[in-house]
Image (cartoon, coloured by chain):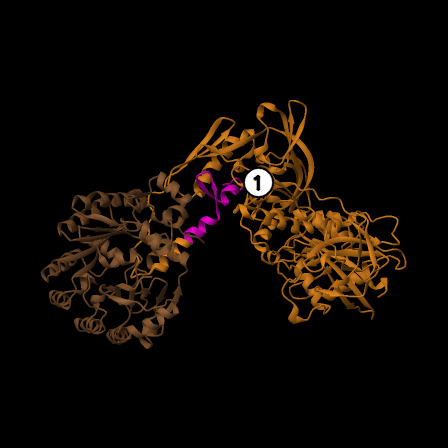
Amino acid sequence: MEKFYKGVYIHTPFCLQKCLYCDFPSYANYGAEVQHSYIDALCKELANVNKLEQTFFAESGLTNPLTIAENATIYFGGGTPTILDIAAITKVVEVLKANNIWQNPAEATIEANPGTVDLDKLKKLRELGFDRISFGVQSLQDNELKALGRIHTAAEALEAIKLAKQAGFERINADLMYGIIGQTKESFAKTLKAILEENLEHLSVYGLIVEEGTPFYDMLERDALALPEENETLEMYELTQRLLPEYGYNRYEISNYAKPGGESRHNLVYWRYLPYLAFGAGACSFNGAARKTNSLDVTEYITSPLETAILEKLSLDIQKEEYIFMGLRAAEGIDLLDAKKRYNLDVEKEYKEELEDFLKEEYLVIKHGRMALTEKGMRFGNQIFEKFIKI
Amino acid sequence: MKENNIRNFSIIAHIDHGKSTLADRLIEYTGTLSKREMEAQILDSMDLERERGITIKAQAVRSMYKARNGEEYMLNFIDTPGHVDFTYEVSRALAACEGALLVIDATQGIEAQTLANVFLALDNDLEIIPVINKVDLPSADPEHVKKEIEDVIGIDASEAVLTSAKTGLGIEDVLEAIVAKVPPPQGDINEPLKALVFDSKFDAYKGVMLYVRVYEGKIKRGMRIKMMATEAVYEVTEVGVFKPNLTNVDVLEPGQVGFFAAAIKNVQDARVGDTVTEADRPTPEPLAGYRKATPMVFCGLYPVDNSDYDNLRDALEKLQLNDAALVFEPETSVALGFGFRCGFLGLLHMDVIKERLEREYNLALITTAPNVIYQVFLTNGEMEMVDNPSNFPDPSNIAHVEEPFVNATVIVPKDYVGAVMELSQEKRGEYSNMTYLDETRVMIHYSLPLSEIIYDYFDRLKSATRGYASLDYELAGYKESKLVKVDILLNGDPVDALSAIAHRDKAQYRGRQLVEKLRGLIPRQMFEIPIQAAIGNKVIARETVRAMRKDVLAKCYGGDISRKRKLLEKQKEGKKRMKQVGSVELPQEAFMAILKMD
């Protein structure tokens, strides 16, 4: 069993405006007062980290509590963490440090909406110790941003990146999206090229997925969502695969690209299926044997931040499956020896039948003791992951 | 209870003419069940029957009624299905009665199915009491319906009872008419037992429960009885009646309807239609019994999960218990593995069986497209009965092929005569004759291939006549047809379970339709899938399911792996209902595609 939490996630469930495609736990209808109460609740949860761990490990059936690794990564995600004023963020960081959650992190990331930062705030974030910033850029065409329900323009996004560099952020990520309403392969190429000129060390490029419960989903049901043709979307995907390596980016996960050394260390914790702690409404922690998820309901969380979590114990079979499908998302894939050590799982034997076809058709490759998706396999990730799940 | 005060009756009606509602009212009126126990249409006890608003199995209920003459009567009501598929069930129920209520919708008049059932009742010498229902509706025209009854059926309708089962109007009049007109059963309690088995049910604790109508003698607990067809002897362990819940009584006497159990484990020993008598004092002659039901429609039933094969067989055996019309025998398909070729009375029967297997026995099934039995005459002089298209002999060995035809009766407003004829012509029908029921309605007779009826004739008829047409048909023997086998190839390999028999002139069109339909049904997979239709070696149509281009999950926030997992599980669950045929995953609907054209 793992002894350390390798990553720490802090959730801010607020946004200025909810994007039309978003189904993350984030709300645009809470004012400053609720946000303050939320920070208080969050700090209370953080201050009780040890007490909470006592219940977590015991209820998960583990023999010992886990400790937070000294270099555990820090990740402020959302929602929009930068919607909070700097005082609020400072308060949270201080509580993190005071409770030895934030010690000497391998990486401290904060997500930011380009419409919510200025130079002063960025500088202060840098001073607080954040060394990585991740911008939700999505597109650099204003009509597309509008179609997504984003609050910022293309110019504002580029400006925010410039300011972040100025504030001393060397590790910057931009999230981009393809398959947006009104997007063409030409407009996407323009966005890509513009962002490549920024020479960031990390890019996340996602295909738009219309999730149930979002305004886009309703529009799609009503046939009122004019998504680009499949072929066009596919060309955008292919352009990404072609162009990014030319600019020195490695595809180290299905949707993530980085210059050497620029990989998101925090996200690797998830893909390697290592333990992480998470705080805030809707936040989900994992200790290797169970997950606990706080209530998505902000009011409920504020009222009792220590008591809303629901524990889900993970059977060994589920752990094995998740280990595989999370691991396969990353280009490095799964270390077969590690699988044996952690789960006594002989992947090649256990999934002999499934693997045979995938290896033959070159969706998967086994090399140097690791099993990984090929480029072709990455396209059909879901079809492949599914085969490793038993229901 | 004196025999004189017993009345056994059933209700016959066209679908939706209010039979079940009327039955409910009668039960309610006689206080057989309290208001609280009444659940709308209690007789349709299967979920399936309630949902579809149809009666599938015959049911029986005993009520006590104090008539206006001050005497108390025992009314045994045997409910019957109204659909053409279940004519067989109707004839069984009718044989156990002395009278029948003929329920006709006052706004609709006589329909094709009404006629068929009335003639069955007349064949059984039943006293028929016309009941004109739904008289509360503004468009009701009872006088017109009375005239129609007299003109078309030829029975006196002057004393027809007017009712509204919905509002409760005329219910007492119906009960009085039953008492006054339905003859009491005849029979001597001192004679050796003679009882007709009209239905049966399997109970895990009690064994086979036999539903009987007693003609002579009596049935009591502890008595040794003999099944006349099989000569099997049992001791009666339980006797009861339907109120409509099973209620134990001491004895069943002549004229009474009820059930008994006798620890009968072997279904074959308790055949519906058999006569029950006393083991030590048998009656010399059995009752007439029933004509055997002939399955007309066949399809393959296969478990999605091959390991369910034995469960499927057990389930079919259980259903067959009280459904003699269901036949099945094991068969194998290259594409689908081990399954059963099953024979049904018709499409509804097939649907019902399939749904019951899925619901009551929790089986995931693949049904192949239904077909009729072909008589294939070979060049060597032999004749083969082919109930599965994939067994259709090689064309070079075939001298000629015959297929079953039916005599179809369509009743329709006269404005739609043209539409009905056009459709029937297209369906290879031969016109027989046409009669006017009155100034506005026409009865048309056609000879049609049964295969066209099970294909889409009824649906097309309904839409061509805006739902006004009613249809009934009976088997009328075999006739020669120019038929060929259309094969379907996926990825170049023939899929036996998708083969179909079609008329030569329509084969090309059907082949094209079928591949187009399949293209829409087969989900894109990681590779391209060519779909071809072929007659012999000649490809007559081709379509392609393009390869899936990409399928990956979006990002997840934080470490929310549960959500990802659920998505993958949902995806996998969807595929559970698919059948792997070669390298292609086929949804269940694909096997029925040939039926759902246009």
Range drawn in magenta:
B570-598
The residue to which callout 1 is attached is: B455
**Which amino acid is tagged 1?**
Tyr
Q: How many marks?
A: 1
Figure colour of chain A: brown
Disc 1 crowd rating (10 Å Cα; few below 14, some 14-19, many 20+) is some
Residue A109 vs B118, above or below: the answer is below
Q: Nearer the viewer, residue B382 or B116?
A: B382
Along the line of sight, the residue nearer the viewer: B271 or B305: B305
Quadrant position of the N terminus of chain B in the picture:
bottom right
Q: What residue appears at the point 65 percent right and 69 percent down from the top-left corner?
A: B37
- In the picture, measured across the screen, residue B104 lies left or right of residue A188, that is right
The residue lying toward the viewer, choosing from B23 and B248, is B248
Does A384 appear in magenta?
no
Q: Position of residue A76 (x, y in %)?
A: 23, 65
Tag 1 secondary structure:
helix
Q: Where is residue B518 in the image (x, y as percent from the top left)?
A: 46, 40
Comparing B466 with A222, the one in front is A222
Query: In the rendered image, is residue A209 in sight?
Result: no
The chain holding disc 1 is: B
Q: Does the magenta stretch include residue B585?
A: yes
Left or right placement of residue A82 versus residue A281 in this view: left
Q: What residue lies at 31% left-to-right and 42% top-to-bottom?
A: A376
Q: Chain B is drawn in which colour?
A: orange
Q: Can residue B377 be seen in this view?
A: yes
Q: Give how far across and how far down residue B8 sits, in percent.
A: 78, 58
